[in-house]
Image (cartoon, rainbow, N blue to C red):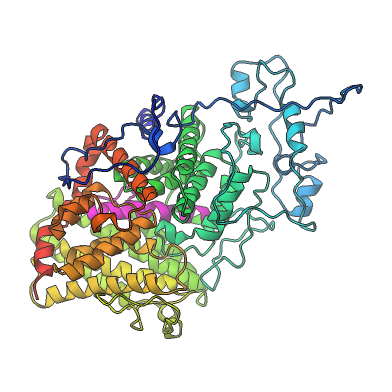
Amino acid sequence: MGDYHYHHFLSSMAGVGGQPNQSPLEGPPQMSHQPQVLAMGGPPMPNPYQSLGYFTGFPEPIMFNAPKSQRSRRKSAPGLDHIKHRRTRSGCFTCRSRRVKCDETHPICERCRKGKRECLYPEPAPPKGSGGSASKESSAAPSQQASPTSSRGDDDDDDDRDSKLEPIMDEDEEEPQSATSTTAPMFPLRRSSTTSSFGLQRVPPGYRYDSETPSFDGNKSSSPLSTGTATAQSHRPDWTFLPHELQFYLGYFYDNITHYHYGLISDAGDFFRATLVGLALRNEALLYAIVAFSAYHHALHNPHGRINEFLQYYNHSVKNLLECLKRKEKYTIATLLTILQLGTIEEYLGDWVNLMGHQKAALEIFTQLFTPQTIMQSQTGRAALVWYGRFDLFVAVMGSFETTLPRDWYLEAATYHDSCAAAEPDNVSWKFEACSAKMQLISMEMAMLYAKRVKEEVTAEDFAVEHQRLARCLDDWKSGWDPALVDPSHLVTDFSGSRTPDPNDIVNPFTSGALFQPPLFASTVLTASYHSMSLLHDSQSGIRPTGQARDKLREHAYRIYQIFEAVEFWSHSPPGGLIALQSALAVAALYVQRDPRHQMWLRRKFVLSESMGYIFPATMRARMAELFSDETCTRWWLPNDEGFPPLLQNIRAYADERNAMAATTQRDTVQQIRHVFSRMNIRDAAREASKN
C-alpha cells in the first residue's frame, strides 16, 4: 500500500509523538452554547481542547511510550539456597499460552491432540552469538528479547507469572470462569507493550492463519446454521491466559456485541464472536482494536463510564498496527481485520475522513491476499468482503463516486451465495446471505451510474434509461424474496411489556408487519435497507417529484420511521438492532415534515442514536440544523442539553476535534466527503416533504 502515507495517517490520527498535556482537566467539556453552523467544506468547528490529554485523563495523551513496569522479584527465604528452575522454551505455542506442560511431541503434542486444538511450534532459535538482522527476523516480538539490564532473563519472568496464574484446564476439567460482569471493572490498566506479557505469540514467518473459522472442536465448518443464528452452537474462544482487564472486555464483547453493531445484515457463521475473537488472540493489534470497541460500548452503558480506557486500548491497537507496517511484515487476514475494526470505530465517531483512510489501506490488502474467487472460499474471507463492502457502498452511493472494489467482487459474492442457497433450500441463513449479496450488487451498480453522471460519462437520456432499469431491479429484488424470509408466523404481534409510545408520536410502532422476530430479524433490517435505497435512488433521478411520486417517497420514509421505533420499543430486540438501522434513518430524515412535532420526534431519535455511541459528524449536524431551521442543533439535538451527559459530551468533543484535524490535513478527502450530504439536495427534499 502507499506505506508512507498510511504510516503518516496512522501516526497523526493517534497523536504519535504528541506533547504531554501540561494541565489535565477534570469534568465535562465546557462547550460553547453559541450556535455555530459549519458550512460543508468550510473551516472546522472551533474546539477549546487542543490535546488528547484531557480526553484520556493521563498527563501524556497516549500511552505509546509508557515506561515498562518494574518486574517483581521474588526473594529467597533466609538460610535457603535459591534454586532456579529454568523452563523449556521449545514447547508449542498453544501449551505455553495456556501455561500447561507440553510433551513436545511433533507434529502435534498430546495435549493439543486430546483437546483438538491447533498445535503450532516456534521457529528454531538462531545459533548462539548471532545478532543484528538475525535477531530481528526471529519469530519472537522485539519486546520478548531479554533486556540488556536484566540479570535473570525471560525465563524468570515466566516463573513469576506462573506462580500467579493458574493453568488452563482441558475440556474434561472444570473451566475457570471469565469476567463478564457488566459493572465497571476496578483494575489498573496495564501498560506493557510486550506480547509475551500475556501469552500472545507472533506467528512465525510462512505460517498462514486457517482460512476457515478457527475450530475449537477440531472441525472446520463454513456452512451457516439453518436457523439463521449461530450463537447457540458457537464455541467460546479460550482467553483465560490474558490479563483480567482484557478478559473482562472480551467477555463483554462476546455477550453484548453482535453483527448488528457493525451495521451488517447477518452473521450466520458467528464470525464476530468466534472467528474474529479467535484471530485476535493471535494478533495484538486486532486484540486491542476489539477490546477498544468493547470498552467504548461498556462505558456508554455504565453510569460512571469514562472515555479513558477506550482511548488507551484504541491507541495501543494503532501503535501495534503501525509497528507491523513499519517492519514491512507480510500482510495477513488479521492485518486486514484490524484495519476494518478501526474503520468501524471511526464510523462510530463520525470520522468519515479517517474511515476512508482505513478503507484505502484495506483495499490494497484485499487485492494482495485475495481474488474475487478465492475470497469466497472461506467464511473469514466472505465476512471480510461483506464488512468492507458496506463501507465501500455506503460512501460511494451517497457520494456519487465509484466503488473501490470492481463489479466482479460483488458479482462473485452474489453468484456464490445464490448457489449455496440453491444447494441447501432449507437453510434460511444462505437465503439471507444471497439476498444481502444481491442487494450489494444492485447498490454497486447504482453507485457506478451516479459516478458516471458526475464525470459526465453518460448522456441524460442513457442515464434516465439506466436509472429506471435499476429502480425496477430494486423493486424486483424486494418482491422476489424467498417466502421463508417473510414467514408471517415470525411477525411480532405481541408487544406486551414494551414501552408506551409518546402521545406526540408520528408513527404507530406496534402495527403488525413492521417487525420480524429472530431468526428472521434480518428481514426487518433488509426491509429498512430497501426503503432507504429507494429514497436514495429516487433522489438521484434529477426529476422533482410531484403528486404520486412524492407520496411514494414519503411512504418509504415513514416505513423506516415505523421500523426504527418498533425495534426501539420492542423489549426483545437483539443488541445493536438500532445501530443497523442508522443509515436508513439518516436518509429518511430528509423527508420528515417541517413541523415542530415531526422534527422533535426525529431529533429525539438522533439523541437515542448518539447515546448508543453513534456520533453524527459536525457536517451532518449542520445540514440537519439547516433542515430544521434551528442552528442550536449543531451543538445538541435538544434544548438545555437534555439527554447530553458528560461522557457523551466528552466523546462528541473528542470526535469533533479529530474531524477538525482531519479536515485541516486531508483537504482532498474532505472535498470528496462533501458529496455525501450535498448530493442529497436538502433544500429541495425538505421543500417537497413539507407539501401535503
Q: Residue at x 61, y 39 (%)?
A: 207
Percent across and percent down for residue 579 are 38, 61
User: For this rendering, which residue is in front, 51 or 487?
Assistant: 51
Percent across and percent down for residue 102 are 80, 41
435 sits to left or right of 292: left
User: For this rendering, which residue is in front, 155 or 623?
Assistant: 623
679 sits to left or right of 192: left
Q: Is residue 341 visible?
A: yes
* Quadrant assignment for the N terminus: top left
606 sits to left or right of 301: left
The stretch drawn in magenta includes residue 398: yes
Please state the extent of the stretch shown in magenta in the rendering: 378-406
User: For this rendering, which residue is in front, 375 or 394?
Assistant: 394
Q: Residue at x 61, y 37 (%)?
A: 203
The stretch drawn in magenta includes residue 408: no
Q: Residue furthest top?
A: 129
437 sits to left or right of 135: left
Percent across and percent down for residue 443 are 29, 61
- Determine whether 276 is above or below 192 in the image: below
* Quadrant assignment for the C terminus: bottom left
Indicate the quadrant where residue 123 lies.
Answer: top right
Q: Is residue 210 visible?
A: no
Percent across and percent down for residue 138 are 63, 26
- Determine whether 658 is above or below 271 in the image: above
Q: Residue at x 10, y 68 (%)?
A: 688
- Per the picture, the main secondary structure of the magenta-coloured stretch is helix
- Determine whether 485 is above or below 641 in the image: below
Indicate the quadrant where residue 94 lies.
Answer: top right
